[in-house]
């Protein structure tokens, strides 16, 4: 039926006639006022019983349609009586519909429904809250109609979104070719999704929630108070309800997608949408507008030139043009997130996967990014001169400012963070396509500022997606996109902007790159889009976006959406989270509180102390996020915070921790595993809490077994912190605060081959140094006494990483045992496979001690220690006195000990220690040929020393040089120590997981530092 036919059958009752109908059919009287309607006749009716609308239906309306309307209202009345929609007032006859014959002889149906309060949404400013409330209202409405069907709902309407393709047939009514092309673009998109519509959930929907059919609370413009006019209700895809409401809400709206998102989010809260429905919304909104403008155009061509029609179309055209300018994928991302879905499928999993697998990523820079001293680049400060120079497109001036800052502050890496609000984006290209009168200001990549030419490597295996040059001023310059598909992670893209153009010749799309492969170099301003040299690194979880579509800067309002589409690349790039957020007390405050609260002789390393907040494998991370390569602290034997240790500890601590007076599996399991690493004679274990306690227990065992007090110890040795151990530690009792040598203590010479008399043949060093022990024994015997024990570290460490000459311990042990003493090997520093070739360093000397003490590395940081000895010694110790140790051997400690042994064995860390140790020794020896100051290089496995001398002939210690190297390495992010009587031996004991890459890192820093110190110390 045409509009003209409709007009002939429009009811035309006078107010009085209508009032008569009201009285006749409903027994009501009141004031009637006519309301506008296109095809029916409506009256507002105010009565004593309330306000109603009297509808006299167009005579041409098929019966099935008014029956449908009535059934729909009745259904809502039954199932959602509280929904603010018109509810039917039955006629006196009890029927929902009455009927009458009009003056023209045509029969009209009549319906009386309740009046819904409120003013049209169209008359308000359509706040976000109101649109969300509208979404909720529609969700409730459609929810109430679930399961409702009526033959009248199945009619053929051009307004049915499934028939939107019919708009193509109306295009001829659109005069302007560009306008037609615009519509054709949307029609083409629609054609691609149309087949999917048939598979979507369908139900009876309102189908026309335009802002004249939606009422807003008179007192609260944020609250929708009613929904009216069900004349277009239809059985259609449910999501069309949202699309249609959003299409109207977007008209003349500054942020139409934001408006749509508010409606969709509200709808979803009441009537959960499916992802595949939300994914169609952008196209459905657009196609509803296409339907609308083409229907108007066709009407206009039928109804001559009605200027009013043209005016009412204008907002729809404007919105279509806006939608055309935006990236549909971004619009969809916004809509998806508004409904609680990921901005792109898999988006959240990508960030999670990267965080969980960060340790396995190859460094993006020559070294892990967190190891460089870094600072924020001041683009977040609009007044900073560097920002102003950059915004004024003077990259060289900006760069000069940055370089001066770096020089002054020792900064090597500038970081421009994700999400930063920036004023540097001055060009037209940064005007928002989503929100009117808004600019894109939030940085969505991660900027890494280093010198032009800095090499960049891919942290993960990759396929090259694209390589291109963007020539726009303030564009990307050379731009590379890589795709990554790590196992267990949704695929994602990494974007590398502002590179040197060279990369275009090196990489080709489709090419595979291994993790760690070169991607390109940072470009100079002339080729990088006109910026101070840096990398703009960005991840995209939407792999369908091309490199140039990926939004480098976004609207603040949608930062949450961008953060999912383009997750912060910091972790991918190896930046530590601590760089962005500092926690806890300042260094100064901690130093002050330590001074006030703690023993004053606790020492602090370095003049400028470091505050570490996290350990991670070979790295310690400070409170500013800088990662230091830990080559010193041998407690973290298998790496800081090793997950296997953490897990074992947490699991056992969460289950049981108690003492050894009860039976438990762990202590015997650990004793079995530990003794299995030792020679067969050493079968009995005792568990304690520290190396000192282990050595104290060893002395008790000695006294019990030999009945003696005398101990032979090596000069410059250290065995622990209790008084009896200080007494046998010349390193302590002979230095500041020491009380000198006790009569039962006998100090033998350090068997330091490097400093042996020149006239001793090397092959005799072992025997000649052992003579010092023989002399001590002879002195005791001259007094009618004998040695209780000889104690020595199997590689004296405090004495300067001294490797015992061949045959030394064999000879010493023979002498001590002949004199009735026992031999104690202190393996507190050197044990647990650190030397690589063996589990225990004494094994390299071909001896078996009577007692072995162990500590530090045993629990990878957990305080535990042990003594292992022979059955004979423990038989003497078992003299009737109970041995009890509250914490020693508890289930948690033993679980940790087992985890450490598991990791050493299962990952062949001893083999690794040997391989990497040899690699480092080769490098150190090569350095020795270049640096006169290196007098001696010593090491086995990952127990290493470099002795520095001012003169290789006199071997005069280069103490200042050694300290300067230690401090210089610290500045370069590497931790080591100095040791030995002259503090001139660089001491290194890196974790057993130290890799070749870590070794290269250490070597490079040492090389750099040696050269630097040589220059500064002359
Ligand atoms: C060789 C040696 N033995 C014993 C100890 C004492 O161990 P702890 O500090 O765990 O008591 C140390 C500690 O530095 C040590 O280096």
Image: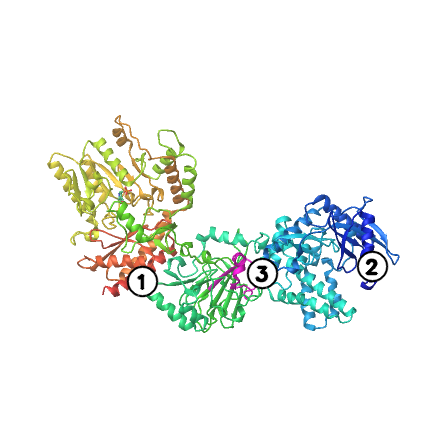
Q: Determine the secondary structure under disc 2.
A: loop
Q: Is residue 957 placed above or below 652 in the rendered structure?
A: below
Q: Dot 3: within a 10 Å radius of its alpha carbon, few (fewer than 14), some, or many (20 or more) residues?
A: many
Tell me how far mark 1 sits from mark 3, CA to CA: 48 Å
Q: Is mark 2 within 8 Å of ligand 1?
A: no
Tell me how far mark 2 sits from mark 3, CA to CA: 51 Å
Q: Which residue is mark 2?
A: 12
Which is more toward the observer, 208 or 579? 208
Q: Nearer the viewer, mark 2 or mark 3?
A: 2
Which is more toward the observer, 166 or 934? 166
Q: Determine the secondary structure under disc 3.
A: helix
Q: Which residue is mark 1?
A: 1008
Residue 561 is inside the magenta segment: yes
Which is more toward the observer, 362 or 931? 362
Magenta-colored span: 536-565
Q: Is residue 932 placed above or below 93 in the rendered structure?
A: below
Query: Disc number at residue 330?
Result: 3
Q: Dot 2: within a 10 Å radius of its alpha carbon, few (fewer than 14), some, or many (20 or more) residues?
A: some
Q: Using the rendered view, name the quadrant where residue 119 is placed.
A: bottom right
């Amino acid at each position: 039926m045409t509009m003209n036919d409709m007009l002939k059958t429009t009811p035309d009752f006078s107010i009085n006639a209508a009032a008569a109908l009201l009285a006749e059919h409903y027994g009501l009287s009141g004031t009637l006022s006519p309301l506008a309607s296109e095809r029916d006749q409506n009256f507002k009716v105010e009565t004593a019983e309330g306000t109603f609308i009297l509808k006299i239906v167009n005579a041409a309306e098929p019966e099935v349609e008014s029956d449908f309307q009535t059934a729909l209202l009745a259904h809502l009345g039954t199932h959602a009586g509280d929904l603010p929609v018109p509810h039917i007032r039955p006629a006196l006859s009890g029927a929902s519909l009455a009927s009458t014959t009009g003056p023209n002889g045509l029969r009209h149906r009549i319906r009386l429904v309740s009046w819904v309060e409120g003013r049209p949404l169209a008359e308000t400013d359509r706040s976000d809250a109101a649109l969300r409330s509208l979404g909720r209202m529609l969700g409730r409405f459609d929810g109430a109609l679930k399961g409702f069907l009526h033959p009248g709902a199945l009619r053929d309407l051009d307004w049915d979104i499934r028939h939107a393709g019919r708009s193509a047939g109306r295009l001829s009514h659109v005069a302007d070719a560009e306008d037609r092309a615009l519509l054709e673009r949307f029609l083409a998109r629609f054609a691609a999704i149309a087949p999917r519509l048939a598979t979507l959930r369908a139900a009876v929907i309102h189908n026309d929630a335009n802002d004249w059919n939606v009422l807003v609370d008179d007192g609260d413009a944020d609250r929708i108070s009613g929904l009216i006019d069900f004349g277009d209700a239809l059985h259609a895809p449910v999501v069309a309800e949202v699309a249609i409401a959003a299409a109207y809400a977007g008209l003349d709206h500054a942020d139409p997608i934001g408006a749509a998102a508010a409606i969709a989010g509200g709808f979803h809260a009441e009537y959960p949408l499916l992802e595949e429905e939300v994914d169609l919304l952008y196209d459905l909104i657009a196609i509803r507008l296409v339907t609308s403008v083409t229907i108007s155009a066709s009407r206009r061509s039928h109804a001559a030139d009605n200027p009013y029609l043209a005016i009412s179309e204008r907002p729809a055209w404007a919105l279509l043009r806006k939608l055309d300018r935006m990236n549909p994928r971004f619009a969809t991302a916004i809509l998806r997130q508004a409904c609680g879905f990921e901005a792109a499928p898999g988006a959240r999993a990508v960030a999670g996967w990267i965080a969980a697998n960060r340790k396995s990523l190859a460094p993006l820079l020559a070294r892990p990014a967190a190891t460089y001293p870094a600072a924020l680049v001041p683009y977040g400060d609009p007044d900073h001169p560097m920002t102003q120079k950059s915004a004024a497109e003077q990259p060289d001036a900006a760069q000069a400012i940055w370089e001066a800052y770096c020089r002054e502050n020792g900064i090597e890496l500038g970081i421009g963070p994700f999400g930063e609000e920036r004023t540097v984006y001055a060009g037209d290209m940064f005007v928002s396509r989503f929100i009117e009168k808004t600019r894109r200001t939030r940085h969505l990549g991660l900027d890494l500022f280093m010198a032009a030419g800095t090499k960049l490597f891919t942290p993960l295996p990759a396929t090259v997606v694209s390589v291109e040059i963007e020539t726009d001023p303030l564009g990307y310059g050379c731009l590379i996109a890589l795709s990554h598909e790590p196992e267990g992670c949704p695929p994602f893209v990494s974007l590398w902007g502002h590179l040197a153009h060279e990369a275009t010749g090196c990489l080709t799309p489709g090419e595979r790159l291994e993790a760690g492969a070169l991607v390109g170099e940072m470009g100079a301003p002339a080729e990088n889009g006109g910026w101070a040299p840096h990398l703009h690194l960005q991840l995209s979880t939407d792999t369908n976006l091309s490199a140039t579509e990926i939004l480098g800067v976004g609207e603040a309002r949608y930062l949450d959406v961008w953060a999912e589409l383009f997750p912060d690349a910091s972790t991918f790039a190896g930046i530590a989270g601590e760089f962005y957020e500092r926690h806890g007390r300042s260094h100064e405050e901690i130093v002050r509180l330590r001074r006030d609260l703690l023993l004053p002789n606790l020492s602090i390393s370095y003049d400028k102390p470091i505050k570490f907040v996290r350990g991670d494998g070979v790295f310690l991370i400070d409170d500013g996020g800088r990662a230091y390569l830990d080559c010193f602290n041998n407690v973290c034997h298998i790496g800081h915070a090793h997950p296997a240790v953490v897990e074992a500890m947490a699991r056992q601590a969460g289950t049981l921790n108690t003492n050894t007076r009860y039976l438990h599996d762990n202590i015997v399991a650990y004793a079995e595993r530990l003794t299995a690493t030792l020679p067969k004679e050493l079968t009995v274990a005792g568990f304690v809490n520290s190396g000192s306690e282990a050595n104290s227990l060893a002395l008790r065992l000695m006294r019990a077994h030999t009945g003696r007090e005398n101990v032979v110890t090596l000069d410059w040795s250290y065995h622990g912190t209790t008084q009896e151990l200080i007494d046998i530690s010349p390193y302590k009792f002979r230095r500041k605060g020491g009380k000198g040598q006790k009569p039962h203590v006998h100090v033998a010479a350090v068997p330091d081959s490097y400093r042996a008399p020149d006239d001793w043949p090397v092959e005799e060093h072992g025997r000649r140094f052992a003579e010092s022990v023989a002399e001590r024994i002879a002195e005791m015997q001259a007094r009618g006494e004998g040695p209780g024990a000889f104690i020595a570290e199997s590689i004296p460490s405090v004495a300067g990483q001294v490797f015992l000459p061949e045959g030394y311990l064999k000879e010493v042990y023979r002498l001590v045992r002949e004199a009735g003493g026992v031999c104690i090997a202190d393996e507190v520093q050197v044990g647990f496979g650190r030397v690589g070739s063996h589990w225990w360093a004494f094994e390299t000397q071909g001896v078996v001690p009577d007692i072995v003490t162990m500590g530090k590395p045993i629990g990878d940081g957990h305080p535990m220690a042990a003594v292992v000895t022979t059955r004979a010694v423990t038989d003497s110790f078992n003299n009737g006195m109970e041995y009890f140790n509250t914490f020693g051997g508890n289930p948690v400690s033993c679980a940790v000990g087992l985890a450490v042994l598991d990791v050493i064995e299962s990952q062949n860390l001893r083999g690794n220690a040997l391989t990497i140790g040899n690699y480092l020794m080769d490098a150190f020896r090569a350095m020795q040929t270049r640096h006169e100051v290196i007098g001696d290089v010593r090491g086995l496995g990952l127990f290493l020393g470099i002795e520095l001398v001012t003169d290789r002939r006199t071997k005069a210690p280069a103490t200042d040089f050694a300290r300067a190297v230690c401090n210089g390495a610290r500045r370069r992010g590497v931790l080591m120590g100095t040791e030995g009587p002259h503090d001139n031996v660089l001491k290194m004991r890196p974790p057993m997981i130290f890799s070749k890459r870590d070794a290269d890192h250490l070597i490079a820093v040492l090389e750099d530092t040696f050269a630097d110190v040589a220059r500064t110390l002359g």
